[in-house]
Amino acid sequence: MSDDLLNLLNRRLPTEIQELRQQLETLVAQARLNEQVMRRFQDAEMRMLSVSSFKELLQYVLQEMKETFDLDLVTLAVIDPEYEVRRMLIDRGIPTAEFPGLMCLDNPSRFHRLCGTSLAPVLGQYNVASRAPFFPRDTPPASIAILPMVRQKKLIGSLNLGSRNEGRFAPGMATDFIGRLAAILGVCLENVTNSERLKHLGLTDPLTGVHNRRYFDQRLQEEVSRAQRQSFPLSCLFL
């Protein structure tokens, strides 16, 4: 090997080593970031799978999930043609104002117009004309992700994510993580709905639909506990 070639290699070698070191550091940083993201999604999945009531699920999805994933807006749209979910809220004494991000829709036509028959996730800029039904008009996000939830080949609703960052959700972005999150939520929503349905059957008369003695005992205990916690007086009137 000539002296000129050897000198050239000696000059270029430190530069190439530095470039390789920088590339390696970038790859390691990205791997750590991916690990953190994956752990966050896994924790979210376990949290949803551990809930035991409809209210607890709503609290996590509509309140805690925003902080977990650094989102500005999270809403949950549920297909509710028979008013079952809305009756469930009433039966459990949950005011709808407590969860403004919950939307109960009578039919899935809006989803099919937006997502098509494939019901694939929709990512992109917020558009009032087509996306407003899934987000409040007073605080619209800049970019959104609408994630349909399907159970047994039937659309049951969607998880809707919003961000003030226009680049947070863009068409063509990978949806593996958030799509799986919506799928897990669909399973949890179905489970708690079935559980609440069984509770309802056990607390009402099957013929008249009137609440039974078991319901009275349960609600009485709940109200007594609430009055004790808040130091409120409590009265009961029989008619």
Image (cartoon, rainbow, N blue to C red):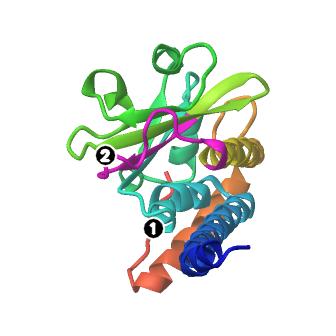
User: Which secondary structure type mostly characterizes the magenta part of the structure?
Assistant: loop
Looking at the rendering, which quadrant does residue 147 occupy? top right
Give whichever of 40, 166 is nearer the camera: 166
Give whichever of 144, 193 is nearer the camera: 144
Q: Are marks 2 and 1 in contact (CB under 8 Å)?
A: no
Taking 11 as reference, is 175 above or below it?
A: above
The residue at which mark 2 appears reads as: 166
Q: Amino acid at mark 1?
A: Glu
Estimate the x, y position of residue 118 in percent, counting from the top left.
64, 18
Estimate the x, y position of residue 26 in percent, counting from the top left.
57, 70
Taking 37 as reference, is 190 above or below it?
A: above
Residue depth check, mark 2 versus mark 1: number of the one nearer the observer: 2
Q: Secondary structure at mark 1?
A: helix
Looking at the rendering, which quadrant does residue 141 occupy? top left
Taking 227 as reference, is 131 above or below it?
A: above
Segment colored magenta: 158-177
What's the distance in space between the residues labelled 2 and 1, CA to CA? 18 Å
The residue at which mark 1 appears reads as: 67
Identify the residue at image location x=29%, y=52%: 164
Give whichever of 173, 201 is nearer the camera: 173
